[in-house]
Image (tube, rainbow, N blue to C red):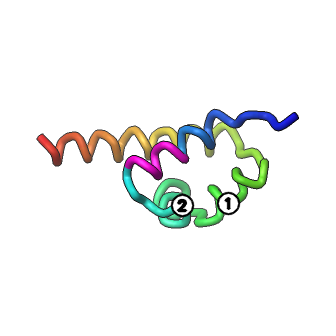
Amino acid sequence: MVDKNPLLDEIEAFLSETGMGPSYFGKQAVGNSEIVARLRKGRRVWPETEEQLHSFMRSERQKRRSAAA
């Protein structure tokens, strides 16, 4: 049985919605261009790293909403 990773699901949705590439996303969000590839391979991240990823996505979504207004 494959465990679902809600963080990876959220990142994949974010990448799809923004058109951002996974390496660019990782580099901008946490300074690690391989983070998405690692998550796709089933690896985990520290809670602090997960919060940084969530924070980056929230911030980017806010910037995009503000720019569209």
For the N terminus, the quadrant is top right
Task: Report if residue 16 lies within the magenta region.
Answer: yes
Q: Which residue is mark 1?
A: 37
* Residue 22: assigned label: 2
Locate residue 25, reporting x and y percent. 49, 58
Locate residue 23, reporting x and y percent. 55, 66
Q: Earlier in the sequence, mark 1 or mark 2?
A: 2
Q: Are marks 1 and 2 in contact (CB under 8 Å)?
A: yes
Q: Amino acid at mark 2?
A: Pro
Residue 63 placement, left or right of 20 = left
Residue at position x 82%, y 37% in the image:
2
Residue 42 placement, left or right of 7 = right
Q: Secondary structure at mark 2?
A: helix
For the C terminus, the quadrant is top left
Residue 62 placement, left or right of 46 = left
Between 19 and 46, which is closer to the camera in this rendering? Answer: 19
The range drawn in magenta is 12-17
Image-quadrant location for residue 19: bottom left
Q: Amino acid at mark 1?
A: Ala
- Residue most extreme to the front: 1
